[in-house]
Amino acid sequence: MSTVDYAKLRFQDPQQRSRAAQRLEDSRSMARGAGATGAQVTEARSRYDNGQINISDSQWRAEWLPGRYAVDPDSGVLMPPESWRRKRALQKAAAAAGDAPRTVSPLPHPQLTEEQKAHIRERTLSPTPYNAAGVAIRPFLTQGSVAERVSIFEKCPAELRQRGASTELQDKMRQPAIAAWRAQNEVKDKAQTYGRERDGRSSTESPPASSPKSPPRRTANARPANKSALIPKFHFPYGRPESRDKVEAQLQRIQQAFNSYPGGQVPKDKFAAIAKACELPLYWKVPLFLAAGGEKTGHVTAAAFLDFWKRLLATSHDQASRFVRVLTAGQRTHLVPEDLVPLVQDVVETHPGLNFLKEAIEFHSRYVHTVIARIFYCVNRSWSGRITVAELRRSNLLKTIQLLEQEEDINQITDYFSYEHFYVIYCKFWELDKDHDLLIDKSDVARHNDHAVSSRIIDRIFSGAVTRGSARKQEKMTYMEFVWFLLSEEDKKHPTAIEYWFRCMDLDGDGYLSMYELEYFYEEQLQRMEALGIEALPFEDCLCWMLDMVQPETPGKIALSDLKQCQMSNIFFDTFFNLEKYLEHDQRDPFALQRDGEPGQTMSDWDRFAAEEYELLVAEEGAAEQDPELVVVEETQ
């Protein structure tokens, strides 16, 4: 009798013999078959694989199992000791409570296929490798996700062993996710085939569409060799460079312009042709002549100028950057007032609208300083005393200089260069400067417009809030500073004027006009109105009026941006420090105020004031010529 038959006999009738007899018989049989244990186990395994033994129909004894398993007496299923003890505890608890014992059905177990049995047989016969910790290494089921391990188990073991488990897993990791269910270009090919069939053409007759090569996959650590080739340059602080052909054509024109003069030497008064060859405005000619080194020798040669122009083209590519480079001779990247003197002096000497001023040399410097002060007032928005390339691009200075060449009447160019505006500014200063030293003090400024400006705002002007230089220490104001004062006083809607008076009224310098600061300046206005017998508006009512007009973003204080957005900033400032204009606004038609604040108005407050004052000054000069005694009487008074 074999061991397997003996085991079946034991399981079929376990109650016929006692437990002690069974143990004795087991020990005898094990002693008799100790030498043939391996062959018997192999034979039993083969009979189990061939289906000759049905273990599920037998009843195992608990004594035959290792210590880590237990047999459920109800179902005969192998269970871990923890689960078995838990089930026995539940049954005992139910019996104590008087409930009927509940039976637990065994879990369903799928039948193994022939391929799975062959796979288990091969894995059993092959030696199992172990690592250093003594744990068995199972390469088929230790890598990948649960889905990958299931797919590996379902594949044919023989085919899997030929390829190797590690190679299969590596191939799966390399392939894209879409390759698991659909090849690349498969959708495109099927769509093309479907379209050909709808057109009545068979897919077999048409040539097969060759799938294009997929683009190379870029690894995560790959970086472009040249970053500038992928990201083109987009920031050009000095302009976008011109093409080489255009530069070469320009250099040829310059060479031809120099060849038209004897010896290739061009003097200062003939340099307009060179400026035109460089495609520059006419009144760049003198700064261009000086930048090329013509001041030392009185002329410029072709070689010297071409060398200078090539260096300029290498760094400056637009008109604004070239203007700064020419006027500073390449020394700075910004303009100071002294850099504009040669250009404005050339306008005085050569512009047809200023021919009458050529002989009055004493007025040349006054006109030049007036124009420069107006340029910095409008262009230098940063209040730094230096005009940068960015500020120059945002202004209309270069267009105005180009317009000088086309307009013969310089008074038509009201921006910067108008002689009438210069005449009004200089006459106003001349009236205040009694000693004619080109410096005025607080008392002189107080006499402006018949003491219209309050003394408290004058003190703030001379405190250094809007002035700079050595004259401020002496509590004096220079002529160029007076130009800024007059422009701000007569046109309080200009952005620079708003900043000018905001600096003066901001006593604590916190960037806001608080209520106490407004009350400080309005107190003097109340005193002056009471002295004149005018019914004054209380400060509380005036404050409500101003806040409703300005509508500040932060309640209780007014910022600079609030005044710039307000269209009636002139009324706001005149209310606090210019009594005459405050009364004029109070008595004026409100619809006229609304029309003046419309953006369609071309003439500014300064242009309107300068035109009226110039007519008055001309009328006074005409009356003085007709009656000289009137002038003598006024001077004696």
Image: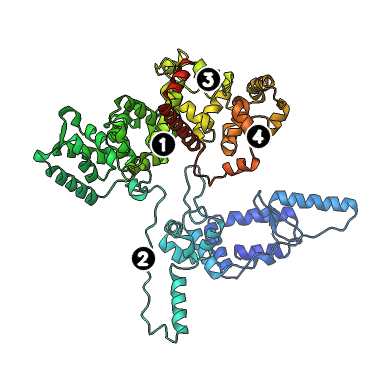
> Badge 1: how crowded within 10 Å, few (<14), some, or many (20+)?
some
> Mark 1 or mark 4, which is nearer the start of the sequence?
1
> Mark 2 or mark 3, which is nearer the start of the sequence?
2
Check disc 3 and report the residue beneath it: 447
Marks 3 and 4, how far apart at CA: 24 Å
**Residue 142 coordinates in the image, percent (x, y):** 51, 52
Marks 4 and 1, how far apart at CA: 40 Å
The answer to whether residue 381 of the structure is visible from this angle is no
Which circle marks residue 587 in the picture?
4
Determine the image quadrant of residue 298. Answer: top left
The extreme top residue here reads: 474
Q: Is residue 229 left or right of residue 256?
A: right
Check disc 1 and give the amino acid type.
Glu
Badge count: 4
**Residue 326 coordinates in the image, percent (x, y):** 28, 35
**Secondary structure found at label 4:** helix
Marks 3 and 1, how far apart at CA: 35 Å
Check disc 1 and report the residue beneath it: 391
Check disc 2 and give the amino acid type.
Lys
> Mark 1 or mark 2, which is nearer the start of the sequence?
2
> Mark 4 or mark 3, which is nearer the start of the sequence?
3
**Circle nearer the viewer, 3 or 2:** 3
Quadrant location, the N terminus: bottom right
Q: Is residue 414 left or right of residue 24?
A: left
Which circle marks residue 213 in the picture?
2
> Mark 1 or mark 3, which is nearer the start of the sequence?
1
| Residue at the image point whose x is 11% and y is 40% from the top | 264
**Secondary structure found at label 2:** loop
Marks 2 and 1, how far apart at CA: 54 Å
**Residue 439 coordinates in the image, percent (x, y):** 42, 17
> Mark 4 or mark 2, which is nearer the start of the sequence?
2
Marks 2 and 4, how far apart at CA: 85 Å
